[in-house]
Each structure stands twice: as C-alpha cells, then as structure tokens.
Amino acid sequence: MERVEIFDTTLRDGEQVPGCKLNTSQKLRIATQLDELGVDVIEAGFPISSPGDFKSVSEIAKLVKNATVCGLTRAVEKDIEVAAEALKYARRPRIHTGIGTSETHIKYKFNTTPDKILERAYEAVAYAKTYVNDVEFYAEDAGRTDNEFLAKVCAEAIRAGATVLNIPDTTGYCLPDEYGAKIKYLMENVPGIHKVRISCHCHNDLGLATANAIAGVINGARQIECTINGIGERAGNTSLEEVVMILRQHPRLDLETNINTKKLLSISKMVAEEMGMMVQANKAIVGDNAFAHSSGIHQDGMIKNRSTYEIINPTDVGVNESSIVLTARSGRSALAYRAKNIGYDFTKLDLDLVYSEFVNFADTCKVVADNDIHHIVQMSKSKFQL
Ligand code: KIV
Ligand code: ZN
C-alpha cells in the first residue's frame, strides 16, 4: 500500500475560526495528542501573525517528537525569517510559504501580473530553502486557477527546491471530478512533479472538502491537509477523521495512513472542548449519533448482525459500542433487546403487551431511557396482570 501523509492544520487553519483561539498551553496539549495520533505534519501556526502565535509555534517545535512541525508564511521575506526562527528547535522543521495564483487573487489581492507571481513563488521557496530543507509551497486559490498557469507556478516552486506542492481549493468551489482532474493535469504536465509530494487542502463551503481531498489522492496527491472535526475558515476544512476512515475502509484504493484510529474520538472531544466548538450529533465518525440506531427496521437488522447497518466497527475509532436508541420509531426487537440489558426477558405475548404501552409512552418524549422502561413495565404489569 502507498502512504498518504496526514498534515494536520487544526492549530493553524482550524484556530482561525472566530471564537476558537487557543493559548500556548492549550496548543501544546493538542499538539501532544496529534503527535500520538500519528499525524505526519503538525501545522503549528502562522508565526509572524502575533507574538503569541510565534511563542506557540516555537514551544510546539521544541516539544513534538515524531511529526514534522510546520509554520505558515506569505511569500514575504520577513514572514519566512520569523517562521525559521520559530521553528529552529524542531526536529523536523517545514516552512509553508506561498501566494495567490488565481486571476481574482492576482488582480484584486496583489494588483500585479502572472509573471510577477511566478517570480515571487520562486523567490519565496528559494529564500525559505536557505533556512530549512523541507519547504512546502501553496498556490492559494488553486481551485479557481487556470490549470496551465498553475502548472507553471508549480514548476517554478519545484525549480526553487519545494518538497511539497499544496493545491488549495481555498474557496471550496471545485467539484470532486474537477479537483481530481486538476491534480491529474499537474501530475502529467509539471516537469519534476514526481520528485515532490502533492498536497490537497480543501475547504468545505459546498460540503465537498472531504470528497475533493479523496479525489485528489485518487489522482496522485499523497498528502491531505485536514483538521480534527473539520474545523477551519468559514465552513471548515477537510475533516481528518473522515479522510482517514475513508482510506481505511476502502482497501481497493491501496492507500494507507499512519493514524491510530482508536484515538479519533478522544482527540475529537479534546479539540471540541479546548476550542469551545461542539461537534454536531450527526457528524461522520465522531458525532454522538454516528453509531446510534433508532428506527425499528435498522435496529432489527443491527441486533441480528451489525454489518447490516454499520460499515465501521465503532471500537476502531474509539467508540465503546453502537447504541440502540429507543424512540417512537423503534420496534419490538429493539425494546426486547434494551429491556433484556436491564433484566427483563419477555415472552412473545408479554412483549406485545409491553410494546403497546411503550409506543404510547414513546410518542410523548424524544428518547425512552432505561428508567422509562422500568416504568413502562410496571404500568404494563398493573394494566395486563403480567
Ligand atoms: O485555504 C488556503 O488556501 C490556505 C493556505 C494559506 C494554505 O489555508
Ligand atoms: Zn485553508
């Protein structure tokens, strides 16, 4: 199997979310967990952005044992110098530098020409190379950049010594086939591309960040930039737990990561708590309902064999077990299953009677808890002399 590297940007793109700012000790706690999770790269911050962020990147650089520690810069000399300083104690430092490459960015952000962008891309990478060996170049808004021009920018970054080429869909605009075709085009048209690693950095404005990152690796990218719980600018980034489990559950892709998936739930909870950004219940992999079954048809299947409605073993992602949640949509087999767990073993006849009480009760509430089952059984006993 070929390895896809996991570049975690929870502490940089993720922390850009309004209200999610972390202090240095919180960042250090999360970085320690990310390293234990097995991510290949931790993007620790944007060192020139504030003294606090500089300190966090520098402390993380000293602390992290296994992962590469990366700092973001613009294609600006001062940014690169400050990032190099913040990363100087890292065992494996990486500078992540780049510039906008779409027509929109060239015209409105930089008010310059495509040729000038090519020059600045080359210069930024070459300057970063004077400090560290590992330099990643990002072509901001690559998703909306003309492929021919993007290939030229990538060629310049490679010529200057880039080790990784990041192709961000900064605005989350691409469709998966379009993003995949972009990566394929670069693989086929950029001189020297096979010496470097292509990276997918996809935003979720249309809910396609995960699908686009997967389309990217199917077409040759070998690094995914992502965040825990998919947090990040606006609608967020590709979710780490989703891409890791997609690659794991689809062996035909022949791609693997270094992630210890059993730690996914605990790190998701930790990041949610530290950032004060709760995870939606229906979030894939780590949401409260990701392994909860509530309709009668599904519950009946699950009780017979979990493969009927589950494609992931919950223990593989750190969830103890799936749950059978009792609601007004639940059937007899779910009621019998849950009642048995708390000591009741009904005959078929008794189950019919208790079930008739159960549905009336369930219509009055959202979820029927174990205490409610005791109550329903007592009611049925007095009503039907069970
Ligand atoms: O979305 C983006 O383009 C970015 C770059 C700075 C890598 O976050
Ligand atoms: Zn981003």
Image: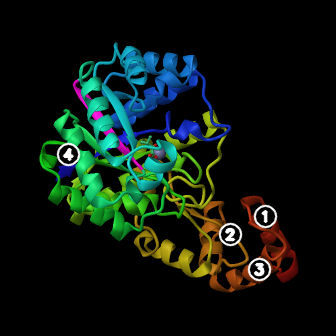
Q: Which label lies toward us, 4 or 1?
A: 4
Q: Residue 79's x, y, as percent?
A: 43, 23
- The magenta stretch is 133-140
The amino acid marked with disc number 3 is: Val
**Mark toward the start of the polypeptide (2 vs 4):** 4
Name the foreground residue: 267 vs 339. Answer: 267
Q: Is residue 135 magenta?
A: yes
The amino acid marked with disc number 1 is: Asp
Q: Residue at x 47, y 62 (%)?
A: 173
> Would you name the residue on which mark 1 appears?
372
Numbered disc total: 4
Q: Is residue 226 above or below residue 349?
A: above
**Mark toward the start of the polypeptide (3 vs 4):** 4
> Would you name the residue on which mark 3 appears?
359
Q: Residue 203's x, y, as percent?
A: 48, 54
Q: Residue 114's x, y, as percent?
A: 34, 48
Do the CB atoms of the residues marked 2 and 1 lie less than 8 Å apart? yes
> Would you name the residue on which mark 4 appears?
155
